[in-house]
Amino acid sequence: FRNDVEHGCPTDCGTCDDHEQHTCLPIVEVTDHCNLECPICIVDNHDSKHMEPATFAKIVDGLVEAEGACESLALSGGEPTSHPQILELLRIATSRSEIGRVVLITNGIRLGKDRELARAIKDMGVYVGLQLDGFTADVHLKIRGKDLVKEKTAALAILAELDIPTQLIFVATKGVNDHQIGQVVELFLSAPHFLSLNFQPVAYTGHGGGNFGHDPNDRLTIPGVIKRIDEQTNGKVKYQDFFPLPCSHPQC
């Protein structure tokens, strides 16, 4: 809940006016259906529901009411492209002038083979967050349970062809794909339609992640990701280029 400043920090904890906090990246899970069974997936309620468009519209209205203006709104899942009304949901989101950009977070499987969907995304001005955890069959098998080299290649090709603004999302996993971190950085730097690259160290929790084999005392964290970026790009992107976000509380 949003709180007014009354007694001062840290008594008035929450998204208070004193710290001007806000929802910087709202993510709406529009479905828990998916076309993959990822070994690392944290979700524990597969294939139970698709969000109704009216429910989604109500969420968007509430977000705009709370924020006034919102820089970004992401649609996720499950796999959001498995929602039978995904284009209707995207139209609802893009119809609000208060929302700066609408992002579809996807594994790219449908996107790479459904040109009509890709064209509609382009025409609506929707951005794409593409899950891309590696470049070889062994990496995909370990993280996503399936060789996705062809599917990822097809998705990357249609995104480039239609010049769809794209964020790459890399779930970094020690001993599985951390040797390909530099490769995804090089891909990110290779074309102007790639707007950002997001590294998410794997979460060892939930349905799949909680059973994924790892040493809890030897995990890959953000500093480890940054170190590998430096090493694997031969210093093109250096460790010293990174800074912590300035919006956190100074005691955090």
Image (cartoon, rainbow, N blue to C red):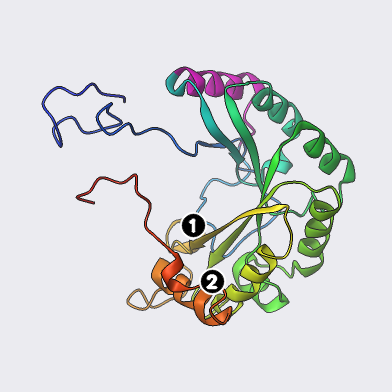
| Amino acid of disc 1 | His
Q: Which residue is mark 1?
A: 207
65 lies above or below 45: above
Q: Which residues are magenta?
A: 49-65
Q: Front-most of 178 and 188?
A: 188
Q: Which residue is mark 2?
A: 237
Q: CA distance from mark 2 to mark 1?
A: 35 Å
- Image check: 251 left or right of 246? left
Q: Front-most of 21 and 1?
A: 21
Residue shown at 23%/21% (left/top)?
4
31 lies above or below 91: below
Residue 198 is drawn in which quadrant?
Answer: bottom right
| Amino acid of disc 2 | Val
Extreme-left residue of the structure = 7
Residue 216 is drawn in which quadrant?
Answer: bottom left
Residue shown at 63%/18% (left/top)?
54
